[in-house]
Image (spheres, rainbow, N blue to C red):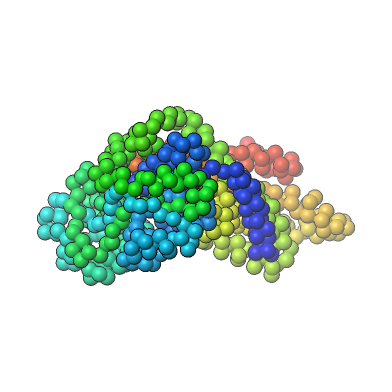
C-alpha cells in the first residue's frame, strides 16, 4: 500500500513543479566550489547584459548532479573541465576536443572552446612539512605510509581521482573524504598532511603550500570550458555565442586572481564577475532581506512536503493499526525509507524532478512518513481494549468509532509524530541547497566554502529558530485540538 500511494503523491509534486517551470528563465549551474561559481556568474551576467533573463543555480553539489541536470534540461549550461569530461563523464580517456564534441552532440549537448586556463588536479602539502620529509613529488609519498591524507569527497570516488592515482603510484596510505574547503583548514592545523588541490586555488600561495609534481603524468589536462544544451543555439543564439566567445579570454593568472578576490578578499562572486566583464555590479541585498527570502523558501519545502506526507501517512497509520500483518509491512517499509542516507535520496530524485524544489520536496515527503505512520499506529493500538470494546458494544459503526473515539484518544500521540516529522524536515531541508532548492542551506554551504562563520550562522541560526518555533506551534495545536476531558490535569 505504501508503495502504491507514494507514486501518486510524487506525481503530484512533479505536476506542480512542471507547471511552475512553464515560463522559467534560462539557467546556468555551478558546482560547489568557488571557481565554478565565478565562471557561472560570468556566463550569467554576460547573458543578462544582452537582455536575457538568466538564473544562476549556484553550487549544486558535484559533477554528476550538474551533468544530469544538463542532460535532462534542468539547466542550460554550466562550466566544466575537459579532463573531467573525458575521464569521468564520457569515459573517453585521452580523447581530442573534436572527439568530445562529437560524443556530446550525440547527447544533444555542445562545448565551447577552452576558456584559457588548465585547472588540473594536484596533491599538496604544507611547504615546511614537505621540506622536512624531503617530499617533492607524488612518488615520494610511497615512502611515508604514515602520512594522513584528506581528499575531497568527489575526488575519492572519481576514476581520475584517488582510486586511479593510488594504483598508478602504488601509494599505501588510506585516504579520508571531506569537504574541499575544510581540507585547507585541516592541513593548516596539522590534522592532515596531504590534500588534493585545484591548480588555480588561491589558497596555494596564501597557505604557502608545496604542490607535488605529478612525475608519472597521471592527471590529464583540465581545461575549463562551458557545456551547454545544443538547442540553446536556436532558443538563445546570442547567449550561446557569448559563451563561445569566452574561449581564450581567462588565463590561469587571471583565474587565480578572481578566486583570491572571493576566497581571501571576501568579495561576492557576482561583484567579481561584473568587474571582470566591465558591467555594473549588482546591489547586494541586506542580511534581513536575504534571511526573509530564505525563510520563505525553507517554509515552502517543509510545508508542502509535510502536507503531502499527512495525506498518505495518516491513512497508512490507521490501516497499519487495523490490519496487524499488513501493518507490520507498512511499518517496515516506511522504516526502511528512514534508513536511506538523506543526501542520496535527494540525488535519487533528480532524474524524476530535475533540480530545485521538486526533488527536495519529494525526498522530505519520504522522510516524513515514518514518524507519522508509526505514531498513528501506536496511538490507535495503545487505546485500552475496554474503551474500544465499549464503543463496539454501543453499536457504533467502524467509521464512527474511528472519528469519534479512536482518533481523539490517539490525537496526542499522532500530533507528536507530526511534530517530529516537521522538526526533522526543518533540519534535513538544508541539504536541498545542494540541488538548487534554496532555503537556509544556501548560506550554510556558501559559508563553509568561503570559511565565513557569519554566513554559516545566517543559515544555521534561523534554521534552529524555525525548528523551535515549529515545535512550539505544534504544542499549541495539540492543546487546542485535544478535548478538554482528555487533557492532563495541571500539576499543583
Whether residue 423 is visible, yes or no, is no
Question: Which residue is depicted at the point 40% across and 60% down?
Answer: 101
- With 4 as the anchor, is 189 left or right in this view? left
Question: Which residue is depicted at the point 51% across and 53% down?
Answer: 231
Q: Quadrant of the N terminus?
A: bottom right
- With 96 as the anchor, is 214 left or right in this view? left
Question: Which residue is depicted at the point 48% across and 30% down?
Answer: 288
Q: Does residue 394 lie above or below 168 as drawn?
A: above
Residue 191: percent from the left, percent from the top? 25, 53
Residue 16: percent from the left, percent from the top? 64, 48
Q: Does residue 157 lie above or below 57 as drawn?
A: below
Q: Quadrant of residue 202?
A: top left
Whether residue 358 is visible, yes or no, is yes
Q: Quadrant of the C terminus?
A: top right
Q: Does residue 71 lie above or below 30 as drawn?
A: below
Q: Does residue 453 lie above or below 132 as drawn?
A: above
Q: Quadrant of residue 145?
A: bottom left
Residue 121: percent from the left, percent from the top? 28, 56
- With 186 as the anchor, is 324 left or right in this view? right
Residue 151: percent from the left, percent from the top? 30, 57
Depth check: 360 or 475 in front?
360
Question: Which residue is depicted at the point 48% across and 33% down?
Answer: 290
Depth check: 393 or 456 in front?
456
Q: Quadrant of residue 486?
A: top right
Depth check: 450 or 249 in front?
249
Numbered marks: total: 0
Amino acid at each position: 500500500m505504501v508503495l502504491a500511494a507514494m507514486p501518486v503523491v510524487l506525481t503530484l509534486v512533479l505536476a506542480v513543479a512542471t507547471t511552475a517551470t512553464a515560463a522559467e528563465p534560462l539557467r546556468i549551474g555551478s558546482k560547489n566550489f568557488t571557481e565554478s561559481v565565478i565562471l557561472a556568474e560570468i556566463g550569467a551576467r554576460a547573458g543578462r547584459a544582452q537582455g536575457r533573463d538568466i538564473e544562476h543555480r549556484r553550487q549544486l553539489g558535484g559533477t554528476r548532479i550538474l551533468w544530469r541536470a544538463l542532460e535532462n534540461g534542468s539547466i542550460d549550461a554550466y562550466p566544466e573541465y575537459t579532463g573531467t569530461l573525458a575521464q569521468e563523464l564520457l569515459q573517453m580517456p585521452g580523447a581530442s576536443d573534436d572527439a568530445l564534441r562529437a560524443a556530446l552532440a550525440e547527447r544533444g549537448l555542445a562545448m565551447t572552446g577552452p576558456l584559457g586556463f588548465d585547472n588540473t588536479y594536484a596533491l599538496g602539502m604544507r611547504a615546511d612539512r614537505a621540506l622536512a620529509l624531503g617530499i617533492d613529488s607524488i612518488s615520494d609519498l610511497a615512502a611515508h605510509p604514515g602520512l594522513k591524507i584528506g581528499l575531497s569527497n568527489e575526488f575519492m570516488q572519481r576514476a581520475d581521482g584517488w582510486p586511479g592515482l593510488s594504483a598508478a603510484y602504488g601509494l599505501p596510505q588510506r585516504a579520508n573524504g571531506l569537504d574541499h574547503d575544510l581540507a585547507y583548514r585541516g592541513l593548516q592545523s596539522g590534522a592532515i598532511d596531504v590534500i588534493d588541490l585545484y591548480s588555480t586555488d588561491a589558497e596555494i600561495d596564501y597557505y604557502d603550500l608545496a604542490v607535488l609534481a605529478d612525475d608519472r603524468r597521471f592527471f590529464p589536462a583540465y581545461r575549463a570550458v562551458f557545456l551547454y544544451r545544443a538547442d540553446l543555439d536556436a532558443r538563445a543564439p546570442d547567449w550561446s555565442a557569448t559563451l563561445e566567445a569566452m574561449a581564450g579570454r581567462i588565463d590561469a593568472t587571471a583565474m587565480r586572481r578572481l578566486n583570491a578576490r572571493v576566497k581571501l578578499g571576501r568579495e561576492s562572486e557576482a561583484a567579481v564577475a561584473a568587474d571582470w566583464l566591465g558591467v555594473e555590479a549588482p546591489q547586494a541585498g541586506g542580511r534581513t532581506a536575504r534571511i526573509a527570502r530564505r525563510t520563505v523558501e525553507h517554509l515552502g519545502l517543509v510545508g508542502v512536503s509535510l502536507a503531502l506526507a499527512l495525506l498518505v501517512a495518516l491513512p497508512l497509520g490507521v490501516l497499519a493499526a487495523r490490519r496487524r500483518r499488513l501493518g507490520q509491512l507498512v511499518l517496515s517499509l516506511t522504516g526502511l525509507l528512514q534508513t536511506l542516507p538523506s543526501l542520496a535520496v535527494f540525488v535519487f530524485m533528480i532524474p524524476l524532478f530535475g533540480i530545485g524544489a521538486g526533488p527536495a520536496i519529494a525526498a522530505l515527503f519520504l522522510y516524513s512518513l515514518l514518524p507519522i505512520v508509526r505514531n498513528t499506529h501506536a496511538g490507535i493500538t495503545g487505546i485500552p481494549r475496554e474503551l474500544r470494546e465499549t464503543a463496539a458494544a454501543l453499536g457504533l459503526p467502524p467509521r464512527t468509532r474511528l472519528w469519534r473515539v479512536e482518533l481523539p484518544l490517539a490525537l496526542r500521540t499522532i500530533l507528536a509524530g507530526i511534530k517530529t516529522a516537521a522538526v526533522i524536515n526543518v533540519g534535513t531541508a538544508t541539504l536541498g541547497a545542494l540541488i538548487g532548492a534554496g532555503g537556509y542551506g544556501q548560506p550554510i554551504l556558501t559559508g563553509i566554502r568561503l570559511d565565513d562563520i557569519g554566513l554559516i550562522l545566517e543559515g544555521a541560526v534561523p534554521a534552529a529558530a524555525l525548528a523551535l518555533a515549529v515545535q512550539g506551534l505544534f504544542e499549541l495545536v495539540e492543546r487546542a485540538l485535544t478535548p478538554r476531558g482528555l487533557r492532563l490535569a495541571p500539576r499543583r
